[in-house]
Image (spheres, rainbow, N blue to C red):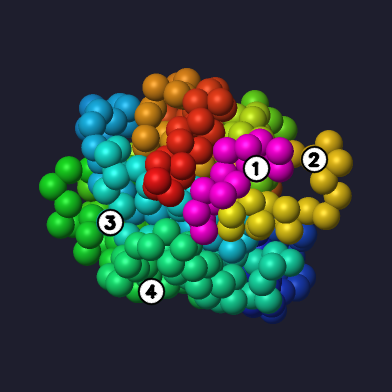
Amino acid sequence: MNHKRIDYRVIPRFTHAIDGVLNRQSHYIKNKVQTFLAFTLFMGLVYGYSQNIPKLSETFRLQRLAPSKGKINVVIDTDTYNEIDDQFAVVYALLSPEQMKVEAIYAAPYLNNRSESPRDGMKKSYEEILRLMGKLGINHEGLVYKGSEDFLKNQNQPLQSNATNDLITRALASEGPLYVLTLGAPTNVASAILLEPKIINKIVVVWLGGKGLNCKTASEFNLKQDLLSSQVLFDSGVPLVQLPTEPVTSHLQTTIPELETYLKGQGPIGDYLIDIFKDYHKDHYAYSKIIWDISAIAYAVNPGWFQSEIRHTPILTDQLTYSFDNSRHFYRIVTFLHRDKIFGDMFRKIQQHHK
């Protein structure tokens, strides 16, 4: 793994040991030794998990990053109860059988005012997925899996869960590329890569996360919830399509009048989506809400609705900024989307499902 991001942090226990030996030495020498030990530890951690990750050729990676043609196989990784946009995305995917086969849905952890802990967020997301499938009349047996109960704390200790186990098994058995539509913190996906690095030969990650490369900060909810897992996506070499929130998917705004026009009375799921939209915000005067998670589903439905570029993967720093090195591997980043075509397609599919 091509790591250029080196954080020279002094480890407290090393500092104590150094003080015992160098208590009469200059601060200059002491700082040099601290830096060396911290660097040595850092490199040991990096190579501890990266040495077994396959190195993909750029030709193979670019083939994987080419816009899909025809029906594809997907799994969805979603922090479904975090907001209200994941609900729209899950419904949209399940109602797009002509464009994709949804093989599994994984509940991802999150932590905000709608959860007490990452574990609680994951459990609420799992329950919300089941609730959505019930309103759609779709059997969830064998399709929905619980994910990680925490965020990644150490890249040498990936978090195993039913979701990671299923993703690894499903990816290794896949004949063609398996698209991993990632709508939240990428903890489950990164852990699966670290647990079984061979899956990067088999998957394409389409991730709603981070901001555009020209923004002053990369900071965004999905990215900063689990920085280490986000760094794995950029550094591991897995074929990656990034859908930045700003200034791209932030255009996916809708309003209560629009939703009532197209979804009101369109079965239990149509009314449910309107209800959770209304409940999310109390002041509806001149109000609109971004439903950005549907972007990952729409990209799988029709990549022609998007403009994108092949770029060298940025270095995601610990300071939540991007750095750049043109010797790094390629990835695809979306730069523009057609908002009306995406919403129009989703609305029509919900209406057709009701009929």
Give the amino acid at mark 3. Answer: Glu
Q: Nearer the viewer, residue 128 or 66?
A: 128
Mark 4 crowd level (few <14, some 14–19, many ≥20, 10 Å Cα): some
- How far across and how far down the image is residue 144, in percent? 37, 67
Residue at (26, 62) in percent of width and height: 168
Residue carrying label 4: 161
Mark 2 crowd level (few <14, some 14–19, many ≥20, 10 Å Cα): few
Q: What is the C-alpha distance between the residues marked 2 and 4?
A: 39 Å
Residue carrying label 2: 287
Q: Is residue 334 left or right of residue 249?
A: left
Q: What is the C-alpha distance between the residues marked 1 and 2?
A: 14 Å
Q: Earlier in the sequence, mark 4 or mark 1?
A: 4
In the rendered structure, are the residues bearing label 4 and label 1 in contact, judged by CB atoms less than 8 Å apart?
Answer: no
Give the amino acid at mark 4. Answer: Ser
Mark 3 crowd level (few <14, some 14–19, many ≥20, 10 Å Cα): some
Residue at (64, 51) in percent of width and height: 274
Q: Earlier in the sequence, mark 1 or mark 2?
A: 1
> Do we see residue 278 in this rendering?
yes
In reply to whether residue 352 is colored magenta, the answer given is no
Which label lies toward us, 1 or 3?
1
Which label lies toward us, 4 or 3?
3
Query: Magenta residues, as a range?
Result: 255-270
Q: Earlier in the sequence, mark 2 or mark 3?
A: 3
* Number of callouts: 4
Residue carrying label 1: 260
